[in-house]
Image (tube, rainbow, N blue to C red):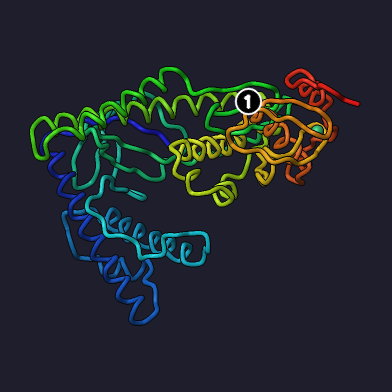
Amino acid sequence: MYQYRLYPSQKQEKRLFNTFNICKNIYNELLELSISVYKENDVTLNRYDFNKLLTGLHPEVFSQVKQNIGDRVHKAFQNFFRRCKDPSSKKKGFPRFKSRINSITYSQSGFKFPSDKRLYASKIGNIPIVLHRIPYGTVKTLTIKRNRVGQWFAIFACEVAVKPVKNTSKKEIGIDVGITSFATTSDGVFVDNPRYLVKAEKRLKLLGRRLSRKKKGSKNRRKSKRLLARQHLKVGNQRLDFLHKLSHELTKNNKILAVEDLNIKGMLHNHHFAKHISDASWNAFVSMLEYKAVISGSTLVKVNPRNTSKTCSNCGAVADMPLKQREYQCNVCGFVCHRDLNASINILKIGQDLPESNACGHDVRPSFLKAVVVEAGTILDNS
Ligand SMILES: [Zn+2]
C-alpha cells in the first residue's frame, strides 16, 4: 500500500463529498434489501445481483466505485455469518447502517496520472497530489479517503512479486506483549511505550476532558472537537511509527519469532482484558510482524497462550500467578524471574516445538536460551 496526500480544489471536494453521500445511500439501500431478502427467502445477494441493480443508477458516480460499495455490503454480510457461527462472538445482529462513508475505491480503472503532480479520478477530476515517493509494482486499486481532521489521501494497493529472502540470523526469540511493558523479549529486553507516545496519550485524555466540559452545540465545543481529532491522529501516527520500527527490528534480527495467539488470549481472559486500549496496538503489532517476517525471510509462530505466565521457564512447574504479582518465584526449583520475561521464554519454548518453526530449517535448540535464563533471572536454590 502506498499513501499520498491529495489537495482537491473546492469544486473537487464538493464532488467527493457528494459521491461519499450517494455511496452511503447506496450502501444503506443495498443493506436493507439484503436483510429483507435474507429474512424472507433465506438467500444472500452477491455482487452480481448488486451490479445488476446498480447499472444505470447514479450516473454521477463512477461504476466501479458503486460496485465496490456492493462488495462492502457483501463483506459485511459475510462477517455477519461468521459472527453467527462463532460462539464467542457477542455481536449477533445484522450489519449496521452507515451514517457516513469516508472513502471510495476504484477497483481497476478510472484513474491515471496526467502528470507527476495530478491524479485523474473519473467523475472527480485532476486532483493535485504529492508523490513523495514512487510506488513499486502494478497498481491494482485506488482508494480516496478523508480522515477526521479533513486531510485527503490517495491509497494505491500495488502488487509486487516478492523475492524469497533467506534470513541469515540464527537467533530465535519469544515475545510477550503486556500492559506494563509494551513487549518483553526472551533475550531480556523490555520494550516500553516511548515517552513521546505516553505524553501524547496523556494530552489526549486532557483534551477529552476539556471537550466534555464544553456546552453542546457551542463554538468552543467545535474547536475542542477539532483539537481532539488532531491529537487522535497524532497519537495514531506516532503509535504506528513505533510499531513499524519495533516489528522491523525484530523480524530483521531473528530467524524465528514466537508470539502468543491473541485470538485465543482474548477468549481466555475476562472482558477487562479486551477493553484495554493496548488491545488494538497488539493486534496491529502482530500483523506487522506477520508480513514483515515474510519480507525478511523469518518465521512467525503463534502459540497458545495458556499458562505462559504461570509456568516456570526453568523447570516447567505450574503455579498460580495473580496479575499484580510481578515476579515469578518457583516453589519447585527456586527460580526467580520477572513475570513477563518468564512468559516470553515460555512462549519461545512452545514456539520452538511447533512444526511451523521446524519446517524452515531450524534444527538445533539454541544453547543461548539457558544462558539467558541465568543472566536475566536469579537462581536462588538450584539443588
Ligand atoms: Zn521452577
From the viewer's perspective, is 349 left or right of 12?
A: right
Residue occupying image coordinates x 37% and y 26%: 201
Given residues 372 and 60, the one toward you in this image is: 372
Residue occupying image coordinates x 73% and y 36%: 346
Location of mark 1 (residue): 252
Q: Position of residue 290 (x, y in %)?
A: 58, 39
Q: Position of residue 17 (x, y in %)?
A: 16, 45
Q: Position of residue 22 (x, y in %)?
A: 18, 55
At label 1, which amino acid type do we have? Lys
Q: Position of residue 331 (x, y in %)?
A: 79, 33
As drawn, 147 above or below 191: below
Residue reaching furthest to the front? 331
The N terminus is located in which quarter? top left
Residue occupying image coordinates x 23% and y 55%: 23
As drawn, 37 above or below 126: below
Asked where in the image residue 79 lies, by quadrant, the reply is bottom left
From the viewer's perspective, is 158 left or right of 146?
A: right
